[in-house]
Image (cartoon, rainbow, N blue to C red):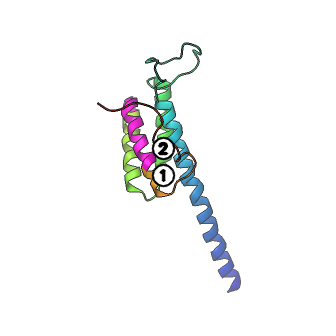
Amino acid sequence: MKKFMLLTLSVAALVLLSWQPAAEAQVSETNQAIQALTDFPGVGGRTMVEDFTKRGGADVGMIKKAAALLQDALSKAGGNAQARAQLEMAVAYANATMHKEARLSAQGALYYLCQGGGGEGCDKAPKFGSYVAP
C-alpha cells in the first residue's frame, strides 16, 4: 500500500512539474512570434539598411516562422479559453499573411497567458512593437 501511495504521489509531482514548463514554453513561443511579426522601427521596409540579412514584419518567411511558433503554442494551450481563442485567430491571420493582425492577436494571447500564470517574458508583455490599429 505504501508503494502504491509513493508511486501515486511521484506521478502527481511529475505531472505538476511538467505542466509548468509547457506554460512557460507557450509564453516564450508567443513572444518569439510577436518579435518575428514586428516591423523594424522607423524603417517601413523589410530589411535594415545596415544589415541586409535581418528580416522581420512583412517578410513572408518570417510570417511562416511565426505561424509555426503560434501553432506550437496553440497545441500546448491549457484551459485558458481566451488565450486559446486569441492564438487561434493569430494562427489564422498568420496563415493568411496578415502580419499586423496576427501580431495583435498574439499580443492579446500573451496578455491572457500572463494573467493565467506568468512565466519568462511576461514582464514586457504585450508591449513589444509599436503598431496601433486605426
Residue type at the position of mark 2: Ala
Numbered disc 1: secondary structure: helix
Picture coordinates of residue 4 (x, y %)? 66, 81
Quadrant of the snapshot with the N terminus: bottom right
Picture coordinates of residue 102 (x, y %)? 39, 35
Q: Residue at x 47, y 23 (%)?
A: 41
Image: magenta residue range: 95-111
Q: Judge the density around disc 1: few (<14), some (14-19), many (≥20) Cα neighbours within 10 Å.
A: many
Q: 85 or 127: nearer the eye?
A: 127
Please give the residue where the numbered disc 2 appears in the rendered image. Answer: 125
Q: Is residue 56 magenta?
A: no
Q: Judge the density around disc 2: few (<14), some (14-19), many (≥20) Cα neighbours within 10 Å.
A: some
Q: Are marks 1 and 2 in contact (CB under 8 Å)?
A: yes
Q: Main secondary structure of the magenta part?
A: helix
One can see residue 65 in this view? no
Please give the residue where the numbered disc 1 appears in the rendered image. Answer: 114
Q: How many marks?
A: 2
One can see residue 16 in this view? yes
Numbered disc 2: secondary structure: loop
Outermost residue toward the right?
A: 3
Q: Is residue 18 above or below residue 43?
A: below
Residue type at the position of mark 1: Cys
Q: CA distance from mark 1 to mark 2?
A: 8 Å
* Image disc number at residue 68: none
